[in-house]
């Protein structure tokens, strides 16, 4: 609607400009020439504005979380696997199990794929023998997604070609993201599966822009495996999937970050 409004306003301005130009001899040919030129300028303007509108629409579609297509029903895994995606891992917040060991080694995981995204504290799911089969799958893309209250709230799609079970999670491989500032050219002090493990904090799948003391730390996402020194690390149950609920990184200490129910990883071959 905004684009249409701009187009109409510019049309009026250009028409008034032509109407106010002096034409003492009533030269109809000259007036017709000016009107033809005006039409061409308006068409060019319209094409430019339409191009901007298309770019905006694509961006809005990219950043909008998937709605629940089933009303009050829970998101089903078959629905989430549409268009050739396959869920190979799902971690449950607050179930007391390590996510890092579950993802990299399959420790304590179930090989039974969940049916839907109904909230539970079930064992983490991991595809059988995933660490051995990853390279043979000829993976093209990897999707990292978060779910809260039966809605996909954030995601990142990576280039998975030639990757290992951990190397795909790298800023240089980012293709799309629901966070607008999460791009290959952005600066991060952490962007890895192993994350931060220094005896003070234990944050896996850690995406962070900068450290400036707890009060100045800025980031996007972390799997918090155990209690640490900052507010983002202090919870009743672990693990916790904390993430910026903005369209960009946020200051962790504001405690405005959200907690996801699930973390899921998909592959596209």
Image (cartoon, grey):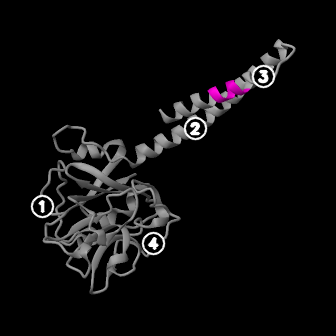
Tell me if mark 1 has few (under 14), some (14-19) or many (20+) residues whose alpha carbon lies within 10 angstroms of its own.
some
SS at badge 1? loop
Q: Earlier in the sequence, mark 2 or mark 3?
A: 3
Q: Over which residues does the magenta segment extend?
A: 12-17
Q: Are marks 4 and 3 in contact (CB under 8 Å)?
A: no
Residue at the spot 56% in from the left edge and 40% down from the top edge? 52
The crowd level at tag 2 (other Cα within 10 Å; few <14, some 14-19, many 20+) is few
- Which of these two is toward me, 52 or 113? 52
* Dots 1, 2 in contact, CB < 8 A: no
| Mark 3 neighbour class, 10 Å CA radius: few under 14, some 14 to 19, many 20 or more | some
Q: Position of residue 164 (x, y in %)?
A: 40, 67
- The answer, for residue 139, to whether it is visible in the render is no
The mark found on residue 34 in the picture is 3
Q: CA distance from mark 4 to mark 1?
A: 31 Å
Q: Is residue 246 magenta?
A: no
Secondary structure under tag 2 reads helix
Please give the residue where the numbered disc 4 appears in the rendered image.
Answer: 188
State the separation of the CA atoms marked 3 and 1. 71 Å
Does 15 lie within the magenta span?
A: yes
Q: Give the residue displayed 46% in from the left and 66% down from the top.
A: 171
Tag 1 residue: 121
Disc 2 marks which residue? 51
On the image, the x and y values in percent for residue 247 come to 39, 56
Lower position in the chain sequence, tag 4 or tag 1 = 1
Which residue is depicted at the point 36% across and 42% down?
83
Closest to the camera, between mark 2 and mark 3, is: 3
Foreground residue among 221 and 249 = 249
Which sits earlier in the primary sequence, circle 4 or circle 3? 3
């Amino acid at each position: 609607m905004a684009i249409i409004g701009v187009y109409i306003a510019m049309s009026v301005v250009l028409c008034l400009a032509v109407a106010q130009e002096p034409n003492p001899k009533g030269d109809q040919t000259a007036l017709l020439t000016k009107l033809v030129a005006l039409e061409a300028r308006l068409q060019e303007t319209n094409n430019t504005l339409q191009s901007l509108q298309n770019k905006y629409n694509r961006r809005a579609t990219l950043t909008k979380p998937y709605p629940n297509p089933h009303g009050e029903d829970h998101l089903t895994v078959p629905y989430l696997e549409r268009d050739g995606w396959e869920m190979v891992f799902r971690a449950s917040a607050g179930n007391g199990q390590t996510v890092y060991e579950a993802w990299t080694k399959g420790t304590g995981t179930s090989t039974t794929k969940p049916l839907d995204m109904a909230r539970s504290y079930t064992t983490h799911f991991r595809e059988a023998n995933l660490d051995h089969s990853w390279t043979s799958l000829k993976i093209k893309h990897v999707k990292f997604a978060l779910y809260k209250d039966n809605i996909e709230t954030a995601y990142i799609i990576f280039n998975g070609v030639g990757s290992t079970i951990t190397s795909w999670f790298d800023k240089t491989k980012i293709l799309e993201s629901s966070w607008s500032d999460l791009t290959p050219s952005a600066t991060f002090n952490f962007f890895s599966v192993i994350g931060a493990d220094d005896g003070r904090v234990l944050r896996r799948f850690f995406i962070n822009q900068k450290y400036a003391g707890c009060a100045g730390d800025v980031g996007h996402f972390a799997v918090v495996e155990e209690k640490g020194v900052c507010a983002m690390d202090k919870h009743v149950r672990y693990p916790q999937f904390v993430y910026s609920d903005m369209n960009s990184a946020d200051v962790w200490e504001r405690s405005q970050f959200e907690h996801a129910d699930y973390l899921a990883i998909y592959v596209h071959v």
